[in-house]
Amino acid sequence: MSFEQARDLFLEGLAALQRGELDLADTRFVASLEKLPGRPSTLMNLGAVRVARGRPDEALPVLDELLALEPDNAEAWGHRGTALAALDRHADAVAAFDRVLALLPQRPAALFQRASSLQVLGRVDEALEGFAAVTYAMPTAHLAWTQRGGILKDMGRLAEAAECFRQALAHGGDAELNRYFLASVQAAEGDMPAGAPRAYVQGLFDSYADSFDQHLVDRLGYRTPQLLASMLPEDGPVGAVLDLGCGTGLMAPLLADRARFIDGVDLSSAMLAKAGALGRYRHLHHGDVAEFMARTTERYGLVVAADVFVYVGDLAAVLAGAARVLEPGGRLLFSVEEADAGQVLQLRASSRFAHGVDAVVTLAQAHGLVLKALNRATLRHDQGRAIGGAMLLLQAGG
């Protein structure tokens, strides 16, 4: 009787899995195992469901039990590698995918996930080789083309990177993202994007949130918030503050004692969670900075944007929005990476925009914002190079 009950529960779990009802599938597989412990196919499906549910810590014991029974089960090793990567145990994930590939050489999924973990570990040469192996084994694997292009871009091998992004586009890859990357390495091939793709920025900073402050400040020498704050008068209040692209809140401690309140807006919910933990913000808003300024009824004495406009090519919307939300006489304080001499706008291989300062000032004046101060400095370092930028203090009329 137990066998029949276990079988029926297993089949109910499979049916729930096919319908996308992962929680129900999980409970049915657990119930099946209670009737018939150690059944490999049930353990496999339970482990896979828990990975899919975002429960990698619960998946691992199940998969380990299966692998103790079937040590050469390539599919189980693959699920184990995926779970380990989700737990940021990337060295262990690489070892798991190595086991998959020893059993099933050139399996594209394992090659891709292994290369992704190698990239996180900073083993970029091995990661590049891995993504290349994916594209050789499956030329239509557009995600591998994009990842391969990104590594080549960071290495300065721009012509090779451009070809990878073209291949990604040809095989159905994210058109907005790959065109953006292609423009960053070979801008003459198409129109300049108006800004970085929203999903790209959001994903970048969501994944970066836990290590953001340490990486940016300690490793890259980032000091833009301090440089911007130094441009404000030393004494006196700054009024209500809007912190555009507030990130983890690096600007807030520099302004909190002088601000009536500080509101923040950012695309990254993970970054906003970090900013909220500071206790320095009145309100935090999840969304695009230009869209927020276009709709809010609040007015501010100071709008600040530290290292934000590097992801915005066309500044018209953000400058118009700032002019709209500033009180009469209010100030806009922001940084830009400065474009090469004679250039109005550049999208660099770093996937960041650089702006010509004169063009920015002219555009700001068209929106009623007058330049009050301009400083230039090294904003941070990237791959050993100093990144020069400009900091502008503008004032609204009235």
Image (cartoon, grey):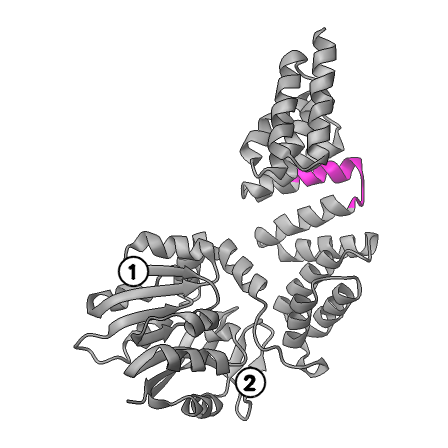
**Could you tell me if residue 320 is visible in this image?**
yes
For residue 121, side relative to residue 229 (left or right): right
Residue 289 in the image: state x and y as whole percent. Answer: 45, 70
- Looking at the rendered image, the quarter that the N terminus falls into is top right
Q: Secondary structure at mark 1?
A: loop
- Is 296 situated above or below 356? above
- Is 251 situated above or below 14? below
- Looking at the rendered image, the quarter that the C terminus falls into is bottom left
> What's drawn in magenta, residue-wise?
95-107
The amino acid at mark 2 is: Leu
Residue 179 in the image: state x and y as whole percent. Answer: 68, 71
- Residue at the spot x=77%, y=53% of the render? 134
- Residue at the spot x=69%, y=29% of the render? 45
Q: Main secondary structure of the magenta part?
A: helix
Which quadrant of the figure has residue 89? top right
Q: Secondary structure at mark 2?
A: strand
Disc 2: CA contacts within 10 A as few (<14), some (14-19) or many (>=20): some
Label 1 vs label 2, nearer the camera: 1
For residue 29, side relative to residue 172 (left or right): left
The amino acid at mark 1 is: Arg
Disc marking residue 282? 1
Q: Is residue 263 magenta?
A: no
Observer-nearest of 75 and 128? 75
- Is 316 situated above or below 293? below
Residue 87 in the image: state x and y as whole percent. Answer: 54, 40
Disc marking residue 345? 2
Q: Is residue 98 magenta?
A: yes
Disc 1: CA contacts within 10 A as few (<14), some (14-19) or many (>=20): few
- Residue at the spot x=60%, y=24% of the render? 27
